[in-house]
Structures are given as C-alpha cells and as structure tokens.
C-alpha cells in the first residue's frame, strides 16, 4: 500500500536532515502516528506501560545515562550526550514569546545555542510553512481519567508535522490559522497553564510544537518533578513588589511548579523550582509581581533575536 502524502513528506524531510538515523525515523513515525499510545505508556496510563517500561529499561542498559539534574541546577550548563532529556525537552516561553513563534511569516532555520536550550541534541528551529498549524487534542490530557479541559490545546507548527497530524488524526486534530492559535495560547494563559516550545530528536531534531501544560496532566512536567530535567527555564524569574503584595495567595494557587511559599505572611519565591513561566504575574490582581531577566537561568527563546544573531554570524 502506498504511504500517505504526509508520511512521504516526513520521510523526505528525514532524508534531507543531516545526522538523522534510521532509528530516529522509526521513532518519529511511531511518535507521530500513535501519539496517544506513546504518551499513555510514557505516563504509566496504559495497560502495556509495565511491559514497555521493562523493554525500555533493558534497551537503555546499552545507552550511557547521566545523573538527572534538578530545576535547581543552572539551566545554562551543557547536558551530557545520552540523556533522555537531551532528545525530548521543552523550553518555557512566556505568552509574548509564544505569540511570536506562532505568527512567523516566512520559513527559517536557526540553531538554538546552549545558553538558550541546555541540551546537546534537538536544538534546531527549522520552520517550513510556519503558517501551517494544527491543533491536536493533548495526548497527556487524554491519557488522564479526569483531564483538564479543553483537550485541543497542543499546537503543531510547520511541515512536515502539521500535515502528518492532520492526515492521520483527522478526528482529533484540525487546521487553524495563526490568529486562532494565538487565541488558544491566550485562553490557556488565562487558565494559568504554562507554554512550552517542544523539541525532539525524533522530530528531525527540531522544534515542532507549542504545548499548553498543567501540572496535573503534563507528562513532561511530571518527569521534571521526578528528576528528569526535561524543561528549561524561560530565562526569567519573578520579582515581588512587597509594597503592593497583600499575601492573598492567588499566585501560589496557580503556580504550576509549586514555587511560591508564604513565610510569616510574606511571599517567598523558591528559585530552585521556578522556571519563569509568568503565570503568577498574570494572576496577580495587584500588579505585585513582574518577570526580570536572570542570566543564571539561561537566555529567553526570543525568535527575532535568534534570527538576527544567526544573520550577523553568517555575514
């Protein structure tokens, strides 16, 4: 049987991408073709999870592993090759940066430096037809017994990924334009959820999606809490204006990383847990919190600056 057009496009993109192995091709195909099975197994919500976990454990005995870092470790450090997180990870992006990723008008190709993404693989932004965007029902939420709503919050950006998802998951995905994608991003921001730009080795080593994540459903956030450093800080930390703060507790309620505590009625930011998502800023009704750049937390994923830097280095 002849492969679907989107499958052929994915294979062609793999052939045109340097350094991709046959394993990457098969891994990427399985990940895109059966994402709900893949994620349900990864988060332990599928009947076959134990079997698949055993297979994975045996396989990884032959792959060098490193000791997991925690969120406290400065994100600008370079991850050693062979880490699971090197090949599948997310960069926290505040709302404004997420909007820019979704509203690009032209193709581009940039290598994201390690001070932005502290991983040794899966650091390319290679966008072909960035206006091709699909919204997919979130595999992480779908895997849960009582998921957060709505389900259609995963934004697949560019080709060959958007086309593949639309052709193979017609009942759980639909094509949207940039305006609707931004509207979904903003609605999730209002719900207090975190925006992650996701990169994966099997997705041709590049950026492929913006996911809107909650701590109760997201598999990546779950893994991060358990010591697998899958998420990189936005490069910001919240700063509190105590003259405005009334210690109401709203920000702590919405914090997806449990990074806000109150000591003697005074708000304290746990910088070891905080990844600078900005949820607390949006939820503070007294404008008592603002994000500030913290060089120790890495560099923000600002697509315009990356493009300018790449242009200067090539000239």
Image: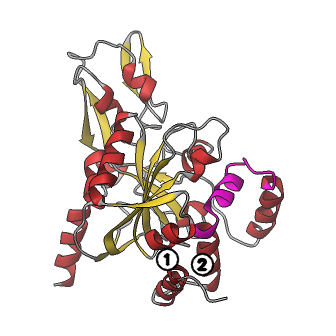
Of all residues, the one furthest to the front in this rendering is 171
Residue 223 visible? The answer is: no
| Image quadrant in which you'd find residue 216 | top right
Specify whether 52 is left or right of 115.
right
- Which residue is painted at 23% across and 74% down in the image? 106
- Which residue is painted at 49% across and 67% down in the image? 166
On whether residue 41 falls in the magenta region, the answer is: yes
Distance CA(mark 2)–CA(mark 1): 8 Å
Q: Secondary structure at mark 2?
A: helix
- Which residue is painted at 29% across and 32% down in the image? 282
| Image quadrant in which you'd find residue 255 | top left
Residue that badge 2 annotates: 24
| Circle count | 2
> x%, y% of residue 47?
81, 51
Q: Nearer the viewer, residue 224 or 272?
A: 224
Q: Nearer the viewer, residue 301 or 136?
A: 136
- Which residue is painted at 42% across and 69% down in the image? 123
Task: Tell me which numbered mark, 2 or 1, is placed earlier along the sequence.
Answer: 2
Q: Nearer the viewer, residue 296 or 185?
A: 185
Range of magenta residues: 32-48
């Amino acid at each position: 049987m002849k492969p679907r057009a989107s499958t052929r496009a994915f294979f062609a993109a793999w052939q045109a991408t340097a350094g991709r192995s046959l394993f990457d091709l098969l891994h990427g195909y399985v990940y895109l073709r059966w994402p709900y099975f893949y994620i349900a197994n990864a988060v332990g919500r599928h009947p076959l999870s134990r079997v698949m976990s055993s297979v994975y454990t045996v396989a990884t005995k032959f792959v060098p592993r490193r000791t997991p870092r925690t969120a406290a470790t400065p994100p600008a450090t370079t991850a050693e090759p062979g880490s699971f997180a090197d090949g599948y990870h997310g960069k926290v992006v505040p709302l404004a940066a997420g909007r820019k990723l979704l509203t690009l008008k032209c193709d581009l190709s940039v290598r994201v430096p390690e001070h932005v993404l502290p991983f040794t693989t899966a650091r390319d932004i290679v966008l072909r037809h960035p206006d091709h965007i699909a919204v997919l029902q979130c595999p992480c939420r779908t895997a849960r017994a009582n998921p957060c709503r709505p389900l259609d919050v995963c934004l697949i950006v560019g080709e060959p990924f958007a086309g593949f998802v639309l052709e193979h998951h017609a009942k759980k995905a639909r094509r949207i334009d940039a305006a609707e994608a931004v509207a979904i991003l903003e609605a999730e921001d209002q719900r207090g959820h975190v925006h992650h730009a996701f990169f994966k080795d099997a997705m041709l080593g590049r950026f492929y999606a913006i996911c809107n994540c909650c701590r109760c459903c997201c598999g990546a956030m779950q893994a991060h809490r358990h010591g697998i450093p899958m998420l990189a800080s936005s490069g910001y930390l919240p700063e509190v204006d105590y003259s405005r703060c009334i210690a109401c507790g709203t920000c702590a309620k919405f914090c997806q990383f449990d990074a806000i505590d109150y000591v003697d009625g005074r708000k304290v930011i746990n910088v070891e847990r905080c990844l600078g998502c900005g949820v607390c800023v949006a939820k503070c009704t007294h404008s008592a919190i603002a994000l500030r750049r913290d060089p120790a937390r890495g560099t923000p994923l600002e697509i315009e600056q990356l493009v300018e830097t790449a242009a200067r280095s090539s000239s």
